[in-house]
Image (cartoon, coloured by chain):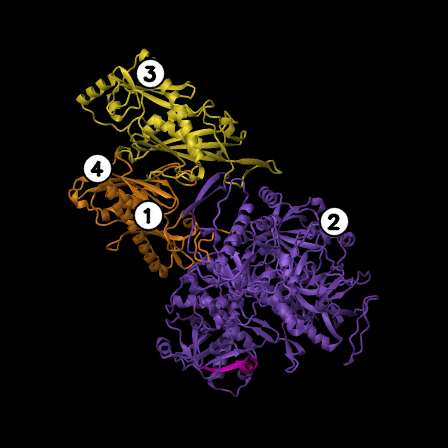
Amino acid sequence: MAGLELLSDQGYRIDGRKATELRKVQARMGVFAQADGSAYLEQGNTKALAVVYGPHEMRGSRSRTRHDRAVINCQYSMATFSTAERKRRPHGDRKSTEMSLHLKQTFEAAIMTQLYPRSQIDIYVKILQSDGGNYSVCVNAATLAVIDAGIPMRDYVCACTVGFVDESPLADLCYAEESGGVSSLALALLPRSGQIALLQMDARLHQDNLDSMIEAAMTACKGVSKVLDEVVRQHLQEVSVLSRE
Amino acid sequence: MATVQVSEAEKVYILHGIRDDLRVDGRGCEDYRHMEIETDVVSNTDGSSKVTLGHTVVLVGIKTEIGKPRPMVPDEGYLDFFVDCSANATPEFEGRGGEELGTELSNTLYRAFNNKHSLDLKSLCISPGEHCWVLYVDVLLLQCDGNLYDAISIAIKAALFNTKIPRVHISADDEGGREIELSDDPYDCVRLNVENVPCIVTLCKVGHRHVVDATLQEKACSVASLIMSVTHRGTVTCTRKVGGGSLDPESIFEMTEAGKRVGKALHAPLMKLLQQEESLGRKKQKVGFLS
Amino acid sequence: MLKSKTFVKKTRSGGVVKIVREHYLRDDIWCGSENCTECKQESAVLQRDACIESNLCSYPHYLIPDTNVLLQQIDVLEDPVIRNVIILQTVLQEVRHRSAPVYKRVKDMIHEKEKHFYTFTNEHHRETFIEREPGESANDCNDRAIRVAAKWYSQHLMKSQSDGDGLRVVLLTNDQGNKQKAEESSLLVYKCEEYIKSLIANPELVDRLALSNDDKNEISSSKVLFPEHLPLSKIQAGIKSGCFLQGTFRASRDNYLEATVFVQGEGEDSTEVLIQGLQNLNRAVNQDVVAVQLLPQSQWVAPSSVVLQDEGTAKDDSAEEEEEEEEKLKISAEVARKPTGKVVGIIKRNWRPFCGMLNVSQIKESTRHLFTPADRRIPRIRIETRQASALVGQRIMVAIDGWPKYSRYPNGHFVRSLGSAGDKDTEQEVLLLEHDVPHQPFSQAVLSFLPKMPWSITPEDMAKREDLRRLTVCSVDPPGCTDIDDALHCRQLDNGNLEVGVHIADVSHFIRPGNALDKEAANRGTTVYLCGKRIDMVPELLSSNLCSLRSDYILKLYFRGSWLLFHGFNFLLLPFFPSPPYVLVQASLTYAEAQMRIDDATKNDDITESLRGLNKLAKILKRQRIKKGALTLSSLEVRFHVDSETHDPIDLQTKELMETNSMVEEFMLLANISVAQKIYDEFPDCAMLRKHPAPPPSNYEILHKASKSKNVAIHTDSAKALADSLDMAKVDCFPYFNTLLRILATRCMMQAVYFCSGMDSDFHHYGLASPIYTHFTSPIRRYADIIVHRLLAVAIGADTTYPDLMDKHKQSALSNNLNYRHKMSQYAQRASVAFHTQLFFKSKGILNEEGFVLFVRKNAIIVLIPKFGLEGTGPTLKVEQHTFSIFDKVKVTISLDDSNIQHQKIRMALTHPVILGVSVPTPDVEPQAKKSKLDR
């Protein structure tokens, strides 16, 4: 049986999108009342739930307190039923630890940590359903959660995964495309300044193609940032309406 | 569970209220909080449900796999439980913090659900001694506001109701080996009969009375609780006492009677609701967390 | 709009997994018709005026074929008459799933602008998307999708029309149920057959219709001749459990009742399973991938040594004749039994269109005839055609449709006619088609990448490159050669050393990677040299003019091969310089001319001096190589003297090897080896190299048998041992023995192949006794050399890489294609030589020559005629008095037997030694001897 054709001659991908189109993004802030900030984001079939606690006093080892800024603590975990084949350990395996580290690095670049010395901000992200682009969805959900918690940030952090097939970059890969042997690149961007917070790729790619991939990723991230902005404004409107009543 | 600090004055306030059958949020002693149930939330599982009981949010996903049956009972399938207390609920559950609670919960669930009285395990058998269906029930705690057992059990019942097991048939080839063949039609599936699946009711002893569906504050005031699983006929299948304090036999008897009453009353509206949701079919709007 | 697709899949470990995928619906998929006013497409593909003359549909219409029609009737759809067809995405994906070759042909048709084929992505269009209903099978769902799309199209096109008699949409399907449902929803639907038959302006299309399984009324006898093929699932289960073996089916060229299946074992070995008998062959065709079951050891047989041809006629569906033939095979020796089996199922068919001739049936009005392919390994095919009388004596192409189990022969349909048989151009065309050699003229797209004439080296290039015009460079090649790609120079330096340079044409400067010219050259792989015709790999402007190192005083760009410094008997390879130089070629000589110059003591000019120096050094190099164990083998190569007017061969001669041949060869080898080392050092992962695996000991059996018959010892443990023992193999009074032995040794060798260094670890070249080797010195006629040029250019910093060059999988695929093309071109060249030999003998009548016996078979001997380099089969019956042994000297008469136009044979008849009943009397040599059939 022939493998899946990732990009047809007419320019359509397996799910009918064109090469530069993103999946459908739906998001909601303030999902949980108990946490300081929470958000739920769906990008296609990848669903992530992000929860922020903080800023609060350091838990755990006091020695890690920084005197001039807040410590950001991230945990990335996946629900055991999130992937097509059941995962046994939700977190603690190497991939989750690596992802947590990446999230931490990304948000340290964006959150204005100097405003909260000697404190800790916890960001927990849980993937409920995984269909490709896990890292990007986490970052987007966590951005919304941090905004919901009222923690000041320099800019939205938007992320997107881009793959390279047949000389053209594909934006926002789904799982079938990612596992089809495509070299993929994940990029987290602060859209207004155009600064890249995180760039990750572990596949073989010819250097001629790197520029076009990064370009495509940045365009895709800017598209995501528009959606996130929309969600935040709408949420604020709803909340302010309720409190007015 | 996540603990809440309650002062002495608050404790007295709650105790007195319960004595008069009036709780802090206006409920009676045997009333449940507002409950919301939705099934088929996660589309790549075989069955899923989400239950919101007050502020407690629980998500259950069921995945079916083909595995080898247990050697003692070669003609039955089985269920496997896993409770994940995620850090979303409280920062204390980060890393390995929630493991203890998770293990405790899954053991109780196992005892309550994985027996032939609750579910027809024989229907999960494909070929005796070789293949059977294994249902991996994964519970995800997203928010904790007391009364975890009840919420989880209702979620599990709803998820089992929602589960669609693909139909397989075994074909024997020449060598005597078995080949499993899936049917081509994605709608061709087996549904489980959840009539006998019990629901767990937790009763907390606060002062001299007991309350159903205690919030975290009420829990902090109670000495001990009794967990029991009740079927739709009112039969009690499993009982356990948790908590640091001690109970005298009369209160246990009272609590058991109350639990039976409450549990029995829970099943009928639940099944009706689930069937109503099912009948909406494809037109049903998937809401999930986006409401 | 977002929908989702859910399905359950089985994993490899036996579990089940549920897959959920998103499915987006779009509003911007256009219909592709010129006529449409609503859709905002940039360029419409389907014409407004889509008229085909048909008495069923007299209005302009578009066609929508369904999957089975597309799979079976691809030949009809490829005809230029059929245009304006809509291929739905559902249909295209199903075709891709079921048959990769048909999918490729459909894609080619879609890309051809004149065919006006349009792909409509119906599964993502909002209005034509359907969801699967519960209880509906996959096939029904696809059929419903096709009907919905057809309905949408007809409604959509109706909207843009003012008048009633406008564009309509016609659905083509052979499925009865689908047709009925379509008619119910008021769609225009026809069966493919009735539609094609209605095209009255083009009746020849009817012949190209593939026979479908519905035509049951044709078959008279319903006797089941062959065992049923097992279904694929049973075959796969059997292979997994080990009771069946999977392999490639290779029919025997000499015996139509015998074949071998090559089963791939672990690593490089493959076991061979013999199949004998029609029932056991079970309708497998050459090159198919089949599943075989081994028979019990008691039933194992030896490969037959009889030569059998299929002489049956069309109406023979009975198996009686076959049984007689099979009896003949059963006389087998105990000694040589091989594993025998029977074919139980076909895994993959590898059918292609075959060239051949029609055997017209004896019955006057019959439309069913037998087609005999030119390739002896393919069985005869039964086709149905009305034009039988017109096709007699013509070479035609036929494709197989199927082989039902009650039919003695497979069924097929006519594709096209090539010309009259025996005609030189037709035969050449057949040869090229049968060997899959691309020989169409270069397309406009390819030619657009050639540089504009007049071309000369630009000043920028001159600045970047080194000026070496001061060197006396000359090239030595066969006479009449226009694509000269290599040249040499030799110079005495002041310190007494000799400087030698190998100069190769810089083709990679003109052929840039990735463009149409490059792709076409990569596809062709090599230049094919037929007798009297050359099929170029690159267009003539490059091969004979700009890249060719001719001595026409135009500056040539070239690539430095290797720069050697000789001191006494040792040489030093200088490092490669960073920029490829340019040079002026002083002279282009033929081998004979160069040899004459060297031998002529009076000539002392620069060119002659450098030739002498080169010759001396070449001898040293050769000695060194032989010491290491290089093999010098012999094969008979002939050259034709062709009459300039009629282009018929006048004379036939074996090629002679002169010293100068060897001289050029030595330096080319040295250049190749040094470049191979350089690119491997730089790119251990993706260098294009060439290897020659050592032959397995079993290959040497015929050599041992032959040498033993004359009591000569041949050692085959290593290349050096073989070379040494061949040098010493001499028999008194038999001077030709050594050459004969070398000819046999050549036949034992394996094929040398290209490979990518990252995918293989064995680099050794057995024949040249070199640890590493590649092809570098002929970029004009071999594509592998162009790749090596590019790698070397990157290694010395003269050029940049491009992504495909570094991808080892792509290189590996490329080298597989190059190996295939190389093999096919060799077969084509041999076939061309054979054809010209036959033409030669046609004009000569009967000749009387001496020869040697090369092989002895049960009912024939193979005789080698050294004068003409000819091998032929001479018949002999089993005679008691005289047995033939290998290397016996015989005298034979040679003539052309053209009783069978497709397979004209050189017939040899024995004159000496005289055997009653076998030999023929020596004929008198008369120049005007009429051709006559010889008695046996």
Residue closest to the eye, C50 or C619: C50
Segment colored magenta: C585-595
The amino acid beneath tag 1 is Ser
- Looking at the image, is mark 4 or mark 2 nearer the viewer? 4
- Looking at the image, is mark 1 or mark 3 nearer the viewer? 3
- Measure how far apart labels 4 and 2 are at the Cα level: 88 Å
Residue closest to the eye, C293 or C186: C186
- Residue under numbered circle 3: B255
Secondary structure beneath label 2 = loop
Secondary structure beneath label 4 = loop
The amino acid beneath tag 3 is Met
The amino acid beneath tag 4 is Glu
Residue C889 as seen in the image, left or right of residue C597: right
Secondary structure beneath label 3 = helix
Residue C226 locus on image (x, y percent): 71, 49
Question: Could you tell me which chain the residue with mark 4 belongs to?
Answer: A
State the image quarter where residue C432 is shown.
bottom right
- Asked whether disc 1 touches disc 2, contact meaning CB atoms under 8 Å apart, the reply is no
